[in-house]
Image (spheres, helix red, strand yellow):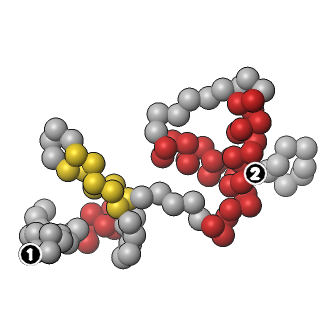
Amino acid sequence: MQSNITTKGQITLPAELRKRFGMETGQKVIFVPTEQGILVKPVRVVDLTQEPKWKKALEQSLAEAEAGKTRSFGSSEEFLDHLAAESKRPQRGRKP
């Protein structure tokens, strides 16, 4: 797949790639220089409509860390995936 760089430095990301990676119009991306070239990655954003659930998951993770239950994440994406999964789980001590 190819694209041209405009005089303003813009490129068009082919529709097939946008669809494959779930990228939408207006979405922010980051550019990561690598030895092979430039990696274009979508920016992960915490959905503010889900903020209360994410906040509880983050508080739970912080409480576990303070209690000595540490966990390592290889990237911020891994951490966000963890928070997303935790925010979907029923709260401990309560029935779903």
Say which amino acid is labelled 1.
Thr
Q: Is residue 52 placed above or below 85 in the rendered structure?
A: below
As rendered, which of 28 and 89 lies closer to the eye? 28
Say if residue 21 shows up in the picture.
no
- Residue 17 left/right relative to 90: left
Secondary structure under tag 2 reads helix
As rendered, which of 21 and 11 lies closer to the eye? 11
Q: Residue at x 21, y 41 (%)?
A: 34
- Residue 84 left/right relative to 41: right
Q: Position of residue 32 (x, y in %)?
A: 27, 48
Q: Is residue 71 placed above or below 58 in the rendered structure?
A: above
Secondary structure under tag 1 reads loop
Q: Residue at x 9, y 75 (%)?
A: 7
Quadrant housing residue 2: bottom left
Q: Position of residue 49 (x, y in %)?
A: 66, 70
Q: How many discs mark residues in the rendered view?
A: 2
Q: Which mark is residue 46?
A: none
The residue pinned by badge 1 equals 7
Q: Nearer the viewer, mark 1 or mark 2?
A: 1
The residue pinned by badge 2 equals 56
Q: Residues within 10 Å of mark 2 (few under 14, many from 20)?
A: some
Q: Position of residue 85 (x, y in %)?
A: 64, 48
Q: Position of residue 71 (x, y in %)?
A: 62, 29
Q: Quadrant of the C terminus?
A: bottom right
Q: Quadrant of the N terminus?
A: bottom left
Residues at badges 1 and 2 in contact (C-beta under 8 Å)?
A: no
Q: Residue at x 71, y 48 (%)?
A: 57
Q: Residue at x 74, y 45 (%)?
A: 59
Whole-Å distance between the Cαs marked 1 and 2? 47 Å
